[in-house]
Amino acid sequence: MADYHRIIGNHSATFPALTEADVAEIRTMSVVHGTIVTMENRIFEVAGAALSVEISAHEALPPLLLLHGGMGSTADFAELVPLLADDYRVICPDSRGHGRSTLGDVPLSYQRLEQDALAVLDGLGITCADVMGFSDGGITGLRLAAHHPDRVGTLFTIGSDWQLPEASRAFSSQVTPQWWRDRNPDGPYSEAAYAEKNPEPDFERLVTENVAMWIDNTSTPGYPGEDVRTITAPIVMIRGTDDHLSSHDLAIALQDVLPGAALHELPDAGHGVAASRPAEVAAIIRRAPRNQSPAT
């Protein structure tokens, strides 16, 4: 098995070693379309959680932080990473409780995910990064850009709303752990896939806390809302025209608030366009303006 360096801060990790299945998944993420990407795995302790982060090797390239969606993992970007690895040092954390990251004892919230993302950048010594967030990751990215303008170069969002539409609240309110099981009996979003990967699985709590975050029923601030008016970073929004989990109207409204924001809508694509249309998403990212130095 190949060695993957695993650290907590500057100390050796006591976290379980990568299994053969773990390495196979990392290689699956790293070898697509003939492009080979060397990924390093690190573990960072942040606010009671052990956050698993995959990082491509080219430190001289500008950093790009990829933030996945709710109930997902770094596997959401399996086909996208190799298409960007010649342009960026790609950094892919598993959000707390997701993938190989533990949940810890702090409730999920968009504010907490924002703080976790900052902790990962700090742990890597990165002062400014481009950020691409899918769904919940995009909401987190919007919070980062609004509250920490010096840390975000260009922000890319995929299927992400900056406010909570009532239709989304109503839809997410019906989600329970059993609802999720019934609609995801197998595949990467299933309970079995999650339990196989996560070192401290608690599916019931993970779904319950995600739902509370989705419907803005947490004790800490959630969707960025009017805070987006303070964003100075270039914003590139990406969504599928068939995405029923993000709002076309809110994307247009964000352009009214931030006239420089760009919107790319991919026809006949749904919520997960990073997975279903990676080449088109990568092309949009590569063509976008860069607002950071080559290595920061």
Image: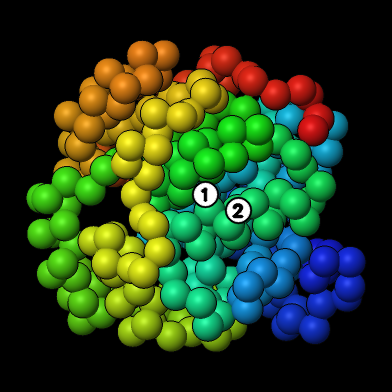
Specify whether 171 is left or right of 157: left
Dot 2 amino acid type: Ala
- Give the CA distance from mark 2 to mark 1: 8 Å
Q: Kindly identify the residue that appears in the image at 27 percent across and 60 percent down.
A: 216
Q: Which mark is residue 117?
A: 2
- How crowded pointer 1 is (Cα within 10 Å; few <14, some 14-19, many 20+) is rated as many
Q: Secondary structure at mark 1?
A: strand
| Residue named by callout 1 | 67
Image coords of residue 200 (percent x, y): 55, 85
**Quarter of the picture holding the N terminus:** bottom right
Pick the residue in front: 188 or 111.
111
Pick the residue in front: 190 or 101.
101
Pick the residue in front: 176 or 37.
176
Q: Kindly identify the residue that appears in the image at 69 percent across and 55 percent down.
A: 120
Dot 1 amino acid type: Leu
Specify whether 55 is left or right of 240: right
Of marks 2 and 1, which one's residue comes earlier in the chain? 1
Q: How is the image coloured?
A: rainbow
Specify whether 111 is left or right of 170: right
